[in-house]
Image (cartoon, grey):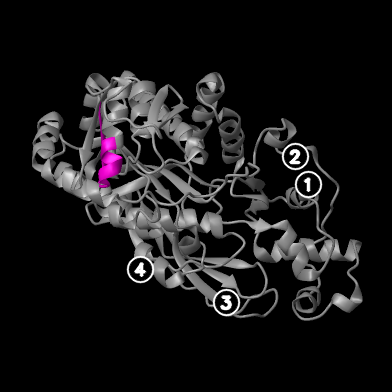
Amino acid sequence: NLKGTDDNIKKIQEGQAEILNNDQDAFYNPIQTFNRDLSVAVIKQFMKSCQDDVAKQRKLGKSLSAAVENGFAIFEGLSATGLRSIRYALELPKIRTVIANDNNPSAFKCIQRNVEYNKIDDIVHPNFGDARMVMYEKSGSLDDQFQVVDIDPYGSPAIFLDAAVQSVSDGGLLCITCTDMAVLCGNHTGTCFAKYGSVSLRTKHCHEMALRIALSSIESNANRYGRYIVPLLSISVDYYIRLFVQVFYGKTEVNRSASKKAFVFQCTSCDSFYLQPFGIKAETGNNQKFQPAKLNLEYQKCAECNSKLKLGGPIWSDPIHNVEFATELLKAITTESHLYKTSNRMIGLLSVVAEEIPDQPLYYVTDSLANSIHSVCIPSLKIRSALLQLGYKVSSTHAHKSAFKTNASSSIVWDIMRCWAKQNPVNKSKIRGLAERILAKEPCIEASFNILPEANPESRKLGLVRYQVNPANWGPKSRAKKRRHEDNDIESSDNKNSKIEKSTLD
């Protein structure tokens, strides 16, 4: 028992950590166990890949090479109970230091209590203060930068990104969570542009678009300092998105950043969308140059229903996952499934991620396609088979249970739906408005709906937990509130704590 604990404190066991928490003290959400499990697994795999690079004498940043030898430094900007930082210290190999920061007085005391309770105060160092200031202080020297920076705020991470991209080492890992999905999914486009520099759209593919808007924003923040990002894993689950990206220095890649982004022209009536690249990469021998993209003037009205188009973005149009990393991560979690409470869900999710077409942004939702023309819903295996038989790629997406990704154009997708409507006639009384405009066009292809074995993804055949059913206590909890009487306690010892933490960090 620790001094100062009260009767309302509960013990919470997760992974190898056990913490003491009162709901009044700090924000804790059990639904985020999946987030924390996945973060531990991703960082562990990232550390392993760094060790492999050193062993095989591949090029690796000076800071990462030193970390492989001496241990990794991790910064968690908004630690709340300290659970995540404690798990990092207990479950990850070769950790030199973990800074568990929070600017909430109650949370700071909670972190101190839990670090002491788990007897890891030699590794995890609680810090009371503004996360941005800590990161800015560490961004000045390459030797002081963190190998891993984890920002998991209540809401948007936008205000932390400038400091985060500077404080992570060359090739280091940046872990970002966004829970402001209403903003990223088109309910507040003005707010989205102000925070992320992109216009969000209310569309069926909004959850993947949210990922790509956030990636575009991180890239823009990094570019200002001669840095660029390489996404390792980007997922949309529950009520948030989680991004794991490496941050590198490199003038050449920074110069071609615009070629990794695109605007989205979205039909205001049907689900058609068109991408307009922001720039193109021109290669001459070993030289790479950025050139402005040529505007496609066909994007004036929707080619399928003649409706107006709305403009969104810019979004990240390059791959949002590193398939090789995701595959190795899947193998590691499968081998160590006993270590993670949510291993079944992680295995299912990563299996779908590994199956996704990597270079095709956004997706279509079968239910919505059928609803637009008032037809019976087309089974996913049938539309996947039709696309495969026409020579196109098709895959599931982790972001939506009823959706598919394909390299076929919107015109081909709608031609398949027109063929489906011919085989499954639509009630004539319903053919009006949008449905009438779409079905008035004759399909330019002959679609076959005979089901192919390869249309059924391996993750579906194995019956993996690909899409989580929301439990009763699903959703974000209320933000932990400061208790006024504690502000003075923190302020009175603030100078003392700062000196202790500074000496600890040094």
Amino acid beneath label 3:
Leu
Give the CA distance from mark 3 to mark 1. Answer: 30 Å
Q: Residues within 10 Å of mark 2 (few under 14, many from 20)?
A: some
Q: What residue type is labelled 2?
A: Asn
**Residue that mark 4 sits on:** 194
Residue 185 lies, in percent from the top left, at 52, 62
Determine contact: label 3, label 4, CB under 8 Å: no
Label located before the other in sequence (3 or 1): 3
- Please give the residue where the numbered disc 3 appears in the rendered image: 309
**Residue beneath disc 2:** 456
Where residue 341 appears, as percent x and y from the top left, is 54, 27
Circle 1 residue: 381
Q: Give the range drawn in magenta.
A: 97-109
Q: Mark 4 vs mark 2: which is more N-terminal?
A: 4
Q: Does the magenta stretch include residue 360?
A: no
Farthest residue toward the front?
7
CA gap between label 3 and label 4 equals: 22 Å
State whether residue 353 appears in this view: yes
Q: In which quarter of the image is the C terminus?
A: top left
State the SS at label 3: strand
Q: In which quarter of the image is residue 196?
A: bottom left
Q: Give left or right: position of 171 versus 466.
A: left
Question: Decide: marks 2, 3 in contact (CB < 8 A)?
Answer: no
Residue at 63% x, 41% y is: 468
Task: Report x, y in % for residue 284.
Answer: 35, 53
**Distance between the alpha carbons at the discs numbered 2 and 3:** 34 Å
Quarter of the image for residue 244 reads top left
| CA distance for labels 2 and 1 | 6 Å
Which amino acid type corresponds to the residue marked 4 in the rendered image?
Ala
